[in-house]
Image (cartoon, helix red, strand yellow):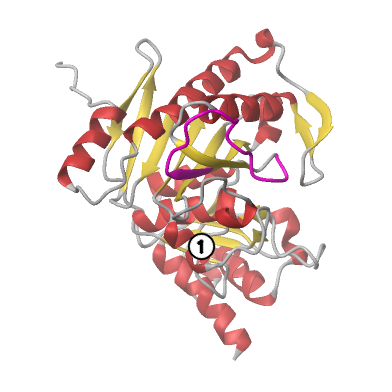
Amino acid sequence: MAVPAYITLRQFLLKEEKEDPSLPKLTAPMEDIVQATRKISYLIDRGALGGTLGSADTDNVQGEIQKKLDVISNEVMLESLEWSGHWAGIASEEVEDAVPIPAGYERGHYLCLFDPLDGSSNIDINGSVGTIFSILPCPQGVTEPRNHDFLQPGIKQLAAGFALYGPSTMLVLTIGRGVNGFTLDKSSGEYLLTHPAIRVPADTRNFTINMSNQRYWTEPMRRYIDECMQGTESPRGIHFNMRWVGSMVADVYRVLCNGGIFMYPWESKDPEKPGKLRLLYEASPMSFIVEQAGGASSTGTERVMEIQPANLHQRCPVILGSKNEVERVVSYHLERDQ
């Protein structure tokens, strides 16, 4: 059997830029992200042998206890991006304020926001985790970006993606022309295009949610989940399967591959908190990816991609995936509000 000829991520981006000259030139900036994800992948592969498992005994800006690999992955991302000359500014989920480019180094035209290690609670059990990133334009005339320069709605994103560190390391990317998946060939260090033109089926029988929080949901969310749980005995007469990894990158990747609906709704157990997931580091980039793959994304009452951020670490509810199921959940919210 002949071995298929795969193109590299770099070749793919150069080809896209040639076909559409209006696209931003992201080939070189993406190499910074690629370099970081390769290193993080290696550290995760080492596991206990690398001495990186367990708690760092520190809290991040969100007040959450950090794993050692949370801290290390953040450092790897910053080191890869700070010095390259491709970025005007950087923001990390693990750091309170935007990170300035060191003095004396060239600055580029783009802003990068990232969650260095999504799902890190899975690290010590050898579960799948990932890195999420979003690329925004630096506002014209700004040479020293501050926090407010990053506060752009998702529709302003130039690119978004995530690396999934699972049985194989994958990078899923959109530059606004669909969604493509690349598998890391560890023998060459190249990401190769293995999953072109990913599409999310409009219909699904799979849902992803943390059922332990059911008692804290609003009526529209309980209504939808009750229908899923009742299966063929519900008014819809459809049997659903529930899947939950607890790592957004892994759960959303399943949605991209097989269809499904991923939900992290508002919960009354902490009513002052607008949601669990961070808008700029998780919700917005993942929504861009899912929409580019033909899916939909909403908070239940508004499109995630159109939310105007008020601060770097803003949270929001997230309901994304197969279009028809997302629209059904939104319709239940509308019925309640009316």
SS of the residue at dot 1?
loop
Q: Does the magenta stretch include residue 103?
A: yes
What count of labels does the image hold? 1
Q: Is residue 150 left or right of residue 106?
A: right
Q: Where is residue 114 in the image (x, y as percent from the top left)?
A: 56, 41
Q: Which residue lies furthest to the right in this view?
A: 57
36 over 203 or under it: above or below: above
Quarter of the image with the C terminus is bottom right
Q: Where is residue 145 in the image (x, y as percent from the top left)?
A: 57, 48
Residue at image coords 44%, 55% = 140
**In front: 282, or 260?**
282
Q: In this view, does 27 lie to the left or right of 216?
A: left
Residue at image coords 74%, 54% = 212
Q: Is residue 51 magenta?
A: no
**In front: 57, or 232?**
57
**In front: 220, or 237?**
220
The residue identified by callout 1 is: 153
Q: In this view, does 48 lie to the left or right of 40?
A: right
| Magenta stretch bounds | 95-112
62 over 234 or under it: above or below: above
292 over 217 or under it: above or below: above
Q: Which kind of residue does numbered mark 1 sit on?
A: Pro
